Structures are given as C-alpha cells and as structure tokens.
C-alpha cells in the first residue's frame, strides 16, 4: 500500500547520523525535525524523461511540513538500516506510482534548512540519486498534489513564480554533475 494511505500507530523512525554519515542512533520523525533539528539520513531523487526534462512534484497540501510547494521528483528518509538506494526506489514508486527505469547514486550533501511555514528544521545528510522514468505516473494524492516535466528554462520560470522547498536549490546544485551525466550536456542542466 502506498505510504500516506495507511494509518499506523507506530511512530516513523529516522536514522540519526554524524557529520560523516555514520549512524549514531534513531529518532522519531517529527522530533528529529523540531528545532534545532537533529542530523538524520535522507535522500533526494531527480528523474528525467527521454527528452531530458526534470520531473518535479508539488507536495500535497496536507503534508506536515513544506506543504503545497514544488520540489525535486521525490525525497524522504530511509528506515533505520535501510540502504538509501533502496529507500529512494521504494518511495519513488510509492509516491509517484512508477518505479525509476534507471537510478544511480549522485553523491551526498549535508545541509540545515528551516521550513518557514511550519517552523520545522531539515537538518539532513542527504543521499542524491538521478535517473530516468518512462512509465506513466499514478501519483498518490496524499503525497503529491501535482507533477510537471520541465526544461531548465521552464524550471527557471517556475522558480520565479512559484514556491519551492527550502532544500531544493541545495540538492539541485549538489546533483548537477550527475544530472549532466544522466541527461547529457545538450539538455542544459
């Protein structure tokens, strides 16, 4: 069952890490995001179609933080002990209803970004992934309000008009070398 459609009494746990990405413990998801924020493992996925356009998602409006804003294809947190690659593939399929046709590691980035709307803190050691998607999308409405495939020029226009997640510029910049390898230099990323 897609994440977001099941109700569970069990708290969602995140993997806490040190500055080098080594696991140091676990924490309940919401508590890890409350100020001042606790450094935890996360992932961000950037998927592209055959034309080299980036798949963006606008987050569902009832998400606990950063609701209704545009962001990268998929982002989330591995379960404690779950490899980030597997978590990224799992959550992409759960949120968008389509598994990546190709997914590759694209490095890591560490950041701390407050969410102005909720007051929560994203303090993450983020594993980055790029890839391709070719299957029709069936987004889970509890997770995704809208999707769009965009060129670099269309992304610039959308960023000028729309609101994006606080972490989006950081993860996009960190993933750019791998994005260029995935899409080819001619795509303009």
Image (cartoon, helix red, strand yellow):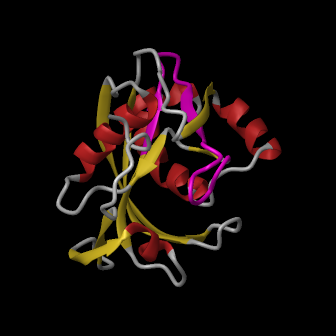
In-image side of 149 versus 127 (left or right): right
Q: Nearer the viewer, residue 9 or 94?
A: 9
- In the figure, 53 relative to 67: above or below? above
For the point 32% across and 44% down, which residue is it?
Answer: 88
- In the figure, 32 relative to 158: above or below? below
* Figure quadrant of residue 159: top right
Image quadrant where one finds the N terminus: top left
* Residue 154 drawn in magenta: no
Q: Nearer the viewer, residue 65 or 16?
A: 65
In-image side of 70 versus 89 (left or right): right
Q: Which residues are magenta?
A: 45-68
For the point 52% across and 40% down, which residue is it?
Answer: 142
Q: Residue furthest bottom?
A: 36
Q: Residue furthest left?
A: 81
For the point 65% across and 46% down, which residue is it?
Answer: 61
- In the figure, 84 relative to 31: above or below? above
* Residue 58 drawn in magenta: yes
Q: Return the x and y of residue 60 as percentages of the image width and height.
A: 60, 43
In-image side of 163 versus 58 (left or right): right
Image quadrant where one finds the C terminus: top right
For the point 61% across and 49% down, which residue is it?
Answer: 62
């Amino acid at each position: 069952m897609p994440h977001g459609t099941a109700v569970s009494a069990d708290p969602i746990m995140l993997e806490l890490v040190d500055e080098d990405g080594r696991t140091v413990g676990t924490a309940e998801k919401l508590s890890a995001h409350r100020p001042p924020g606790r450094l935890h493992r996360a992932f961000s996925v950037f998927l592209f179609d055959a034309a080299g356009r980036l798949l963006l998602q606008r987050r569902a409006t009832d998400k606990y933080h950063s609701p209704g804003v545009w962001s990268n294809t998929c982002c989330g947190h591995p379960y404690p002990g779950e490899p980030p690659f597997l978590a990224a593939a799992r959550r992409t399929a759960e949120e968008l209803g389509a598994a990546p046709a190709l997914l590759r590691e694209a490095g890591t980035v560490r950041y701390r970004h407050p969410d102005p709307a909720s007051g929560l803190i994203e303090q993450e050691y983020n594993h980055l992934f790029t890839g391709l998607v070719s299957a029709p999308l069936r987004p889970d409405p509890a997770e995704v309000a809208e999707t769009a495939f965009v060129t670099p020029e269309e992304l610039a226009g959308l960023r000028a008009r729309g609101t994006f997640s606080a972490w989006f510029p950081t993860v996009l910049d960190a993933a750019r070398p791998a994005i260029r390898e995935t899409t080819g230099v001619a795509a303009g990323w």
